[in-house]
Amino acid sequence: QVQLVESGGGSVQAGGSLRLSCAASLYTYRSRCMGWFRQAPGKEREGVARIYTGDGDTYYAASVRGRFIISQDSAKNTVYLQMNSLKPEDSAMYYCAVVAGSGLCPLVLRPEKFGYWGQGTQVTVSS
């Protein structure tokens, strides 16, 4: 059974930082594609970043590139999202997700490519 548990959300002023964590309970952690998505009220869920646990390869959405860093601690089966220089438009519910099965990450960072999801953690950035 796959279980993803996010933590680390909260409220911060613009320009501040937060670090999100996603603890993964997976039969096999290695060679998985794990991603972070976010969804603001009234908007579609959008991909933020993803990491391939096999070799650490990463990808970022243009809106967060240069500000967010996705990383992993394979000993803890945990993926992190370090968010720096936060903006009010970064406010959203943030979700951790993993592609079902082992293999390379999909070419596009879209929610329908990921089969398992965490419950989400709220991030609020005030101006």
Image: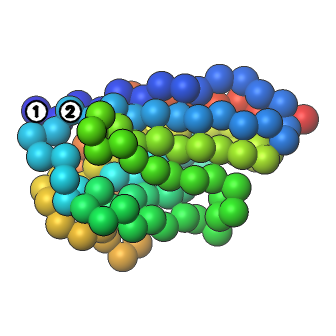
Q: Amino acid at mark 1?
A: Gln
First in residue order: circle 2 vs circle 1: 1
**Outermost right residue:** 127
Q: Secondary structure at mark 1?
A: loop
Q: Residue at horizontal 59%, vertical 35%? A: 19
Across and down, in percent, residue 66 comes to: 69, 63
Q: Nearer the viewer, mark 2 or mark 1?
A: 2
User: Which residue is labeled 1 in the image?
Assistant: 1
Q: Secondary structure at mark 2?
A: strand
Across and down, in percent, residue 89 comes to: 76, 46
Q: Quadrant of the N terminus?
A: top left
Residue 118 visible, this orientation: no
Q: Residue at horizontal 50%, vertical 57%? A: 49
**Res. 44 mark:** none
Instruction: Please name whichever residue, 52 or 109, is drawn nearer the observer in this view of the structure.
Output: 52
Across and down, in percent, residue 126 comes to: 84, 31
User: Which residue is labeled 2 in the image?
Assistant: 25
Across and down, in percent, residue 64 comes to: 66, 58
Q: Are marks 2 and 1 in contact (CB under 8 Å)?
A: yes
Vertical arrangement, residue 104 with respect to residue 53, above or below: below
Count of numbered badges drawn on the protein: 2
Please rate how many residues cluster around mark 1, counting C-alpha atoms within 10 Å: few if below 14, some from 14 to 19, many from 20.
few
**Outermost front residue:** 75
Q: Quadrant of the C terminus?
A: top right
Q: Residue at horizontal 40%, vertical 52%? A: 35
Left-right relation of 12 to 36: right
Q: CA distance from mark 2 to mark 1?
A: 8 Å
